[in-house]
């Protein structure tokens, strides 16, 4: 058991289209921690979380994962395989059944045999409450079901951490709950999670720590209830006032 | 009317046209995929080379390309290799159609959502694995109707192979016409032969489309 943080981020910068998005982020994510990232749109939340698995390549600064620096190179795919990601738009593979969505990467990347990958996939589909839909294609599922498949797909790689990028924002309101429930279950099981979210209730109930991003820097961070129910930072106060 | 010359000439002509179409289409698809990928790939010199290829080939009439490869290039390398008309025609058709097919593949890949690549790479798939298992199957399904069109156009363009002495349908039609002097009958039969080849091809493409169609993914009404 190492006490070193799972993610160790220092001086992270990133510009997109010539516009600076992240202006120097220092952040540690501990093992088993549920870290919620909040902030106004354009504050760099998504860019930050996308830099953590190098889907967005940072311009400057350093990211260490599990004690190893993350850099562009032959080891990058191995890093990505260890960090699960769930997207706002699900991004399931529409030409593959639910089951094949879950077995593709374990078979191709981890070299699992088909039988073992299927066992693993079925177990996960059961956990997200979709054990009976393994033969369906993504387009046959509701948004909430698709997002639960996407979570299961990421978990099939047995990742050490999970990244959630506004995963309920594209869902009809009545479907949000089922996805948040799955995420709560993961948190209970001790998964390290970085969650970009607008659900302050989720942050308070499930999060161990909240980071408030504004203008590409961390403007405030702290214990969720403390930070969100009694905000001191005037910008955070204003941001929270705009929700609801 | 003596059926002997017809029976001697037509079956071989049909077979040659079909064979020429299949081999040329295979070359065109493989080369077209490679050129199409090069056009949207990360390596700039390859992107430029692929774009130049497409523009050059599209600017030259197919008949000139066939002459160029069989007579021109063939003359150039006559000391080391005596060009076979069939190989030359296959190369000419394949190279020509690859330029068009490359553009179709390019559009097919570019029409896919970026999120597909991101999701595949986020799972740890390499660029090649993402292409093979995630992007290519989707792109191929989307461009299948356009590829079917190219296949039919190619089948009909193989009539140009008559200029390099291949006994395909058009060349055989000429031979048969001068042999029997039944011009109307001969060219009617030749036209019907082409249709007899294009119809199964369209049918096959439609069957493949139906097989690859994904359940649930119908267009909204």
Image (tube, coloured by chain):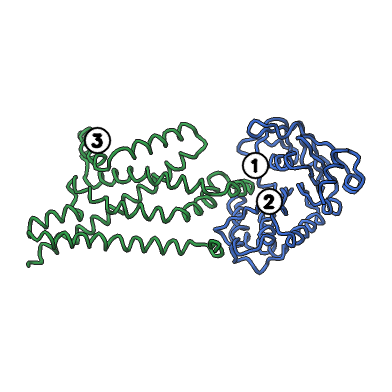
Image quadrant assignment for residue A101: bottom right
Q: How crowded is mark 1: few (under 14 residues within 10 Å), some or many (20 or more)?
A: some
Mark 3 → mark 1, Cα distance in angstroms: 47 Å
SS category of the residue bearing label 3: helix
Residue at mark 2 = A88
Query: Which residue sits at x=68%, y=65%?
Result: A130
Query: Which residue sits at x=22%, y=32%?
Result: B76
Q: Which chain is blue?
A: A
Work out whether residue B173 or residue B43 is closer to the camera in this orientation and state it.
Answer: B173
SS category of the residue bearing label 1: loop
Residue at mark 3 = B73
Q: Which chain is green?
A: B
Where residue A181 sits: x, y (%)?
A: 78, 60
Mark 1 or 2, closer to the camera: 2
Viewed as shown, does residue B133 lie left or right of A232? left
Tell which circle, 1 or 2, labels the residue nearer the N-terminal end: 1
Residue at mark 1 = A55
Q: Do labels 2 and 3 share a chain?
A: no
Of all residues, the one furthest to the bottom in this rendering is A132
SS category of the residue bearing label 2: loop
* Residue at mark 2: chain: A
Mark 2 → mark 3, Cα distance in angstroms: 55 Å
Mark 1 → mark 2, Cα distance in angstroms: 14 Å
Q: Residues within 10 Å of mark 3 (few under 14, many from 20)?
A: some
């Amino acid at each position: 058991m190492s006490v070193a943080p799972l993610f160790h981020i220092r001086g992270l910068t990133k510009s997109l289209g010539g516009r600076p998005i992240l202006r120097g982020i220092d952040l540690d994510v501990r093992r088993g921690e549920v870290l919620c990232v909040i902030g106004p749109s354009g504050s760099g939340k998504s860019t930050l979380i996308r830099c953590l698995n190098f889907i967005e390549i940072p311009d400057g600064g350093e990211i260490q994962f599990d004690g190893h620096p993350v850099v562009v190179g032959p080891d990058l795919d191995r890093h990505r395989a260890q960090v699960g990601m769930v997207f706002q738009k699900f991004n399931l593979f529409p030409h593959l059944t639910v089951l094949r969505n879950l077995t593709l990467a374990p078979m191709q990347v981890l070299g699992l045999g088909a039988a073992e990958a299927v066992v693993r996939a079925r177990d996960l589909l059961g956990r997200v409450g979709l054990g009976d839909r393994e033969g369906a294609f993504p387009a046959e599922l509701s948004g909430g079901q698709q997002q639960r498949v996407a979570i299961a797909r990421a978990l099939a790689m047995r990742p050490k951490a999970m990244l959630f990028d506004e995963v309920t924002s594209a869902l009809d309101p009545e479907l949000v709950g089922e996805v948040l429930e799955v995420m709560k279950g993961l948190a209970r099981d001790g998964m390290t999670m970085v969650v970009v979210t607008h659900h302050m209730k989720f942050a308070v109930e499930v999060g161990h720590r909240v980071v408030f991003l504004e203008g590409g820097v961390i403007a405030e961070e702290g214990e969720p209830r403390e930070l969100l129910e009694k905000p001191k930072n005037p910008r955070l106060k204003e941001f929270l006032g705009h929700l609801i | 009317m003596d059926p002997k010359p017809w029976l001697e000439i037509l079956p071989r002509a049909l077979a040659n046209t079909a064979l020429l179409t299949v081999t040329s289409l295979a070359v065109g698809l493989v080369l077209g995929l490679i050129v199409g990928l090069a056009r949207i790939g990360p390596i700039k010199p390859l992107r430029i080379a692929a774009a130049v290829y497409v523009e050059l080939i599209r600017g030259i009439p197919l008949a000139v390309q066939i002459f160029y490869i069989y007579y021109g290039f063939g003359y150039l390398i006559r000391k080391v290799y005596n060009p076979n008309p069939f190989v030359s025609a296959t190369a000419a058709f394949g190279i020509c159609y690859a330029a068009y097919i490359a553009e179709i593949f390019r559009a097919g890949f570019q029409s896919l959502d970026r999120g597909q690549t991101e999701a595949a790479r986020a799972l740890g798939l390499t660029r090649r694995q993402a292409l093979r298992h995630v992007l290519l199957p989707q792109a191929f399904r989307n461009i299948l109707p356009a590829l079917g069109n190219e296949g039919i156009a190619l089948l009909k363009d193989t009539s140009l192979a008559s200029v390099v002495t291949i006994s395909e349908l058009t060349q055989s039609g000429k031979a048969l016409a001068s042999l029997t002097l039944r011009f109307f009958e001969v060219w009617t039969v030749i036209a019907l032969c082409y249709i007899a080849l294009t119809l199964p091809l369209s049918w096959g493409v439609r069957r493949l489309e139906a097989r690859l169609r994904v359940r649930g993914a119908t267009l909204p009404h």
